[in-house]
Image (cartoon, rainbow, N blue to C red):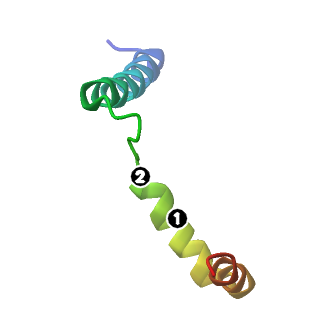
Amino acid sequence: MPHSTDANTTDAASSVMLSDDIESLKKELNTGAFNYIDIASVEIWKKYLEEWPLLAEWDAWSKT
């Protein structure tokens, strides 16, 4: 029967594999200009901008 630590170990291993995949891709492209975009963080940022009007105003101002 698996223990709860087995699930945590699997999650940690998946995270390391993802990190290794990104590093491998950077090396493969060999450009040094690899721009990784974390889609989840972009979606959260959009949510915060909708919830906090002052933050949205600052964001718009900082992009000009």
Q: Is residue 6 above or below residue 14?
A: above
| Residue 34, image quadrant | top left
Q: Is residue 27 above or below residue 3?
A: below
Name which residue type carries label 2: Ile
Residue 52 percent coordinates (x, y): 69, 81
| Residue drawn where x is 61% and y is 77% of the image | 63
| Residue drawn where x is 34% and y is 34% of the image | 31
The C terminus - image quarter: bottom right
The N terminus - image quarter: top left
Q: In this orientation, which residue lies closer to the viewer: 31 or 54?
A: 31
Q: Which mark, by number, is residue 37?
A: 2
Residue 36 percent coordinates (x, y): 40, 46
Q: How many marks?
A: 2
| Residue 13, image quadrant | top left
Name which residue type carries label 1: Ile
Residue 53 percent coordinates (x, y): 69, 87
Dot 2, crowdedness within 10 Å: few (<14), some or many (≥20)? few
Q: In this orientation, which residue lies closer to the viewer: 7 or 64?
A: 64
Q: Which mark, by number, is residue 44?
A: 1
Q: Is residue 55 above or below residue 19?
A: below
| Secondary structure at numbered mark 2 | loop
Q: In this orientation, which residue lies closer to the viewer: 2 or 55?
A: 55
Q: Are marks 2 and 1 in contact (CB under 8 Å)?
A: no
Q: Is residue 64 above or below residue 42?
A: below
Outermost residue to the left: 28
Residue 19 percent coordinates (x, y): 40, 27
